[in-house]
Image: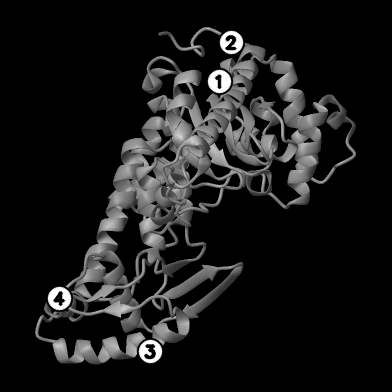
Amino acid sequence: MSSPWSTRRETTPENSRLIIERAHEELVAGNVADVRLDDVRPLVRESWRRSLASLVGAEALPPLDLPSAQLEEYRRAHPLAGVIDMIRGLLVPGDLDDSGVVIAVGDAAGRLLWVEGDRRIQALTGDMGFVPGANWSEDAVGTAAPGTSIALDRSVQIRGAEHFNRLVQPWSCTAAPVHDPETRRILGVIDVTGGDQVVTPQAQLLVDATARAVEGELLLARLRARESSAPRRPARRVEAGRTTLRVLGRDRALIEVAGDGVETVSELGARHAELLLMLAVHRQGVSAERLGELVYGDPDATVTLRAEIVRLRKALEKAAPQVTLESRPYRLGAPVETDAHQVLSLLDRGAHRVALAAYRGDVLPDSSAPGVDEFRSSVRTALREALLAEASVDVLLAYADTATGADDEEVLRLCLSMLPARSPKRAGLVARIERLQAE
């Protein structure tokens, strides 16, 4: 069956786009009373003002609210998990990978839970943080169909330049909220993102109809469950809190514990940071000999290791009491996410720009522990190779401006090959390459 997105197109006139862009520039600059804002649709104009009031940056990347360790469990328990196949079938009855659009399903807070669709489009939109786990509410990224649809509790279409965030302006999107069929509270949002074909009247009708069909299916499933005499298993509760170890660009790691609206942050000593990181990397557990080799470079350092483990246990009792250290093998009794693993997860999802922004430097840069050195190198290499293989030129240029990529001639040459012939950035790149060759 052919895709409903393949032939319907509605191009926004160029002069209209320029008017919207200029009005946006005036608003962001603080000229909230500029008369050009009157040329912007009221729905968009009011959303811009809400975005400005929420202090959303005009080029802000969405926060990753659900790291990979939490995402799978959270969406498995979400009410929309059972209707994902239905949403796919209604919106893209043909080949999803070659549909020309990306379909996203989020929760009531605007956090994306599923993002699927055309592989090329998904790679490009992932670059601006349109990935599972990211927060696309108005408060986080400003005017965009998923968040604005939730804010207004109605279907919404946002065309290119109408987005508050400049990084999102190459795209258009249509979204509609999904309600609980009995209480009418918002359960989530369905969004279609792509080119001009996703903001036609037909597109809005299709997304709206899909949301209503999903609500009907949820009601039928609920009625069938009530009629059944078989006991139902209660939905699994997802623990609200999480523990994060921050090791990027830091010699003394931070351990953050979030839960029940409270976040505590504690600093760890260098050796404790190395030990905890190795246990977070080797989640299946490691023997005393192997842990000694990873941290001290000596498998026979078990006496020293055991004494340090005792001290680490006491430190965790104060900083993160829910994280216990088990023995035989040594392992963590509760999951600990690291900011380095979050970067790797973002790279896997194609969110190169967000991953680069989250990469604040090498893992524990002053540590000489063999295991830390190996992990540090693997994260740095994964970032570089992913950017070289898939990132856009502006992301590569941003990488070239970091301490990690500044002297990488291959990156500089790739940027040079991707830039237009008349780009003013070419001269600076040529000078940097010549300097590296002269050294």
Judge depth for marks 3 and 1 and give the one in front: 3
Q: Amino acid at mark 1?
A: Gly
Q: Residue at x 84, y 25 (%)?
A: 39
| Among numbered discs 4 and 2, the one appearing first in the sequence | 2
Task: Kindly state the secondary structure of the residue where label 4 is placed.
Answer: loop
Q: Quadrant of the N terminus?
A: top left
Q: Amino acid at mark 4?
A: Ser
Q: Nearer the viewer, residue 432 or 420?
A: 420
Gap between marks 3 and 1, in whole Å? 55 Å
Q: Amino acid at mark 3?
A: Lys
Decide: few, some or many residues near mark 4? Use Cα within 10 Å; few <14, some 14-19, many ≥20: some
| Among numbered discs 1 and 2, the one appearing first in the sequence | 2
Q: Nearer the viewer, residue 122 or 397?
A: 122
Seen from this angle, which residue lies furthest front? 229
Task: Kindly state the secondary structure of the residue where label 2 is placed.
Answer: loop
Task: Kindly state the secondary structure of the residue where label 1 is placed.
Answer: loop
Residue 51 can be seen, yes or no: yes
| Residue corresponding to mark 2 | 9
Gap between marks 4 and 2, in whole Å? 61 Å
Judge depth for marks 4 and 2 and give the one in front: 4
- Which numbered marker is on residue 195? 1
- Which numbered marker is on residue 152? none
- Which numbered marker is on residue 287? 4
Contact, mark 1 vs mark 2 (Cβ under 8 Å): yes
| Among numbered discs 3 and 1, the one appearing first in the sequence | 1
* In the rendered image, the vertical position of residue 129 relative to residue 196, given as above or below: below
Residue 304 on image: x %, y %: 19, 91
| Among numbered discs 1 and 4, the one appearing first in the sequence | 1
Judge depth for marks 3 and 2 and give the one in front: 3
Q: Nearer the viewer, residue 165 or 233?
A: 233
